[in-house]
Amino acid sequence: MSTVGNSTNIFWQECPVGKLERQKLLNQKGCVVWITGLSGSGKSTLACSVNRELYSRGKLSYILDGDNLRHGLNKDLGFKAEDRTENIRRVGEVAKLFADAGLICIASLISPYRRDRDACRAMLPDSNFIEARDAKGLYKLARAGKIKGFTGIDDPYEPPLTCEIEIIQKDGLCPSPGAMAGEVLTYLEEKGYLQDQ
């Protein structure tokens, strides 16, 4: 028995089918690929491309898109710093559940604060949090002062200090969505996430 938050008499229920059994069934390792970047940087495009490529290889994944989650799970939150922190905490908890289920969870959110992303990383055991940064961004309206509270312009965005995957421009050009997805899948293959052993 323990006290969790404001609740008491809370028990963690263990079940005979666990993460290892689910991973064996799916022939993949559960993890979270957390795609962070400024608004308009292509996070959702990258997430959908990775999802499509995983599907074509017979791998089960699910996208947690920041905008989509604000239609349901996080619709009660605004964009103040404390709301952004709670938004990321909730998504981190859901992503952790998907990874425990053996899925490759692709979380695509601005997630502007490094401490919030680090807190999500700490929720997952065994280095199963893979941070990917999409560095391209489109900011003409915000820089012109037509959008207030825009992350990266007049509201902070703290890029990762170190991340497992960084999508960068080559010769001044952003890679195609397929090429970006290829970078992510190469990492997942090299680290053994696309098989259960």
Image (spheres, grey):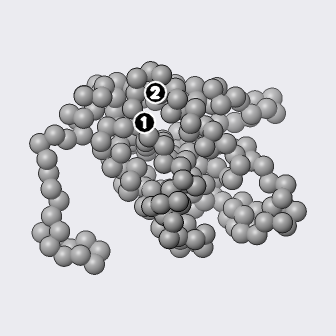
Q: Is 25 located above or below residue 45 in the figure? A: above
Pointer 2 local density, CA inside 10 Å: few below 14, some 14–19, many at least 20:
few
126 vs 109, nearest the viewer = 109
Q: Is residue 165 visible?
A: no
Residue matched to label 1: 61
- Position of 146 with respect to 175 (left or right) is right
- Position of 99 with respect to 180 (left or right) is left
x, y percentage for residue 165? Answer: 56, 37
5 vs 115, nearest the viewer = 5
x, y percentage for residue 46? Answer: 60, 37
Name the residue located 12 percent from the left edge and 69 percent from the top edge.
Answer: 1
Name the residue located 80 percent from the left edge and 54 percent from the top edge.
Answer: 139
The answer to whether mark 2 and mark 1 are in CB contact below 8 A is yes
Between the C-alphas of marks 2 and 1, the distance is 7 Å
Name the residue located 69 percent from the left edge and 62 percent from the top edge.
Answer: 151
The C terminus, quarter of image: top left
Residue 55 is tagged as: 2
Quadrant in which residue 146 is drawn: bottom right
Task: Kindly identify the amino acid type of the residue bearing the numbered disc 1.
Answer: Ser
